[in-house]
Structure formats: C-alpha cells, structure tokens
Amino acid sequence: MYKKQNIFLILVAIIIFSGCTKDQHFLFEMGFQRDFEIKAGLNTVEEHNFVLNNFNVDTAGNLGTRGLTYNKLNGIFPSTMQLQNVSSGAALNFIYDVSVLIVDKENPNVSLEAFYREPVPTDTGIQLDLVPTLADFKQILIKNNFDVRVKIRVRNITPEFITARLIFKLGVK
C-alpha cells in the first residue's frame, strides 16, 4: 500500500516539476549592445535612470528572410541580458536592484519591463546576469526603433566612473 502511494507521489512530483521549465524555443533571436556611463558618487536614496536612445531593428527584414510575417508571430520576448563593467575591475555589487525597460520611441509613456535583478547578489563581479520577464514586445518592435531605460538603485555610493555595457537578446516566437 505504502509503495503504491510513494510511487504515485513521485510521479506527481515529476509531472509538476517537469512542467515548470520556461519554454525558450525561439524561432530566432535579435541581439543588441550599448555602452553607457554610471557616474561616481550616485546616492543611495534615489533611483537613477539611464536612457539609451535609438535602438534600430529591422523586424520586417528579419522576418522576411525567414519566410515569416507579423501575423504568424506569437510574440517577441526577452531572452538574455548581461550588464558588464568594461572600464575597470570594479565589481557591480554596489547595485541594489536594476530594471531594464523597452520604451516605445513614438510614445515614451509606453514602456514594458524586459529584464530585472532584485536584489543584486552582494558577491557580484564585473558582470551581472539579469532575469527576463514574460512581456511581449511585438507591438513596440513593429516600429523598428525603440529606446531602453535602465533604472538602478544602489546599496552603496558608486566607487568610480564606470563604463557599463548592456548586452541583450530578444527572442521571436
């Protein structure tokens, strides 16, 4: 009797946990990269915003070369993102949390969070991997041009000027 119950519980656990993986089967991914400067001495009270303008993407061209159209897409979703210190060996552990939003170029009031990390681990080095959200950016990327807003709160005053590099991919399903 107990063996049957144990086997049943194990099977239920396998089914539940195997269904919890995120579906990452993209038709293709579009990569982007941009550098920006984090100034020395940022305070711990305010949220600091960095606006990175004019990310160009030829969504129609990318789809056309693969025989796809907008109507056939399920969506365009965040895939991977890294924030790197490319100017020095200073760790990014002074950051408390970070959020990256994709902003509609034509209407800056329209934005969706694409990636985040909250809280940033205190043992972070010069590279920080961010977590993708489930937001769909199809409507923003149809316009072929978007902005990115990086929102950072720091746990410690920034130690020096840092050239940060944002590297990310958006996946098309």
Image (cartoon, rainbow, N blue to C red):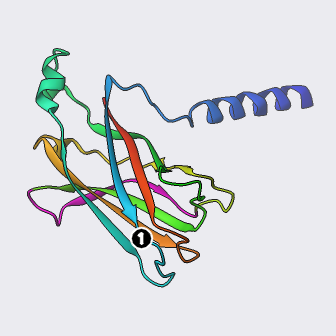
Q: Residue placed farthest to the right in the image?
A: 2
Residue 52: image quadrant is bottom left
At a point 44% along the width and 68% down the height, the residue shown is 152
The quarter of the picture where residue 58 lies is top left
Give the quadrant of the C terminus: top left
Question: Is any part of residue 150 visible from this angle?
Answer: yes
Q: Return the residue nearer the eye: 58 or 157.
A: 157
Is residue 1 visible to the viewer in this orientation of the structure?
no
Instruction: Reply above or below: 75 against 46.
Output: above
Left or right, residue 14 beside residue 58: right
What is the total number of numbered labels drawn onto the structure image?
Answer: 1
Q: How crowded is mark 1: few (under 14 residues within 10 Å), some or many (20 or more)?
A: few
Q: Where is residue 80 in the image (x, y as percent from the top left)?
A: 44, 40
Q: What residue type is labelled 1?
A: Lys
Secondary structure beneath label 1: loop
Q: In this view, does 151 lie to the left or right of 69?
A: right
Where residue 51 sits: x, y (%)?
27, 63
Residue position marked by numbered label 1 in the rendering: 39
Which residue appears at 48% of the width and 53% of the height?
Answer: 87
Q: Where is residue 142 in the image (x, y as percent from the top left)?
A: 12, 40
Return the residue nearer the eye: 121 or 90: 90
Residue 65 falls in which quadrant of the image? top left
In the foreground, 100 or 156: 156
Q: Please name the residue shown 40% across and 43% down the image.
A: 167
Q: Does the magenta stretch include residue 56?
A: no
> What residue is at 63 percent from the left and 35 percent from the top?
16
- Location of the N terminus by quadrant is top right
Q: What's drawn in magenta, residue-wise?
A: 106-119
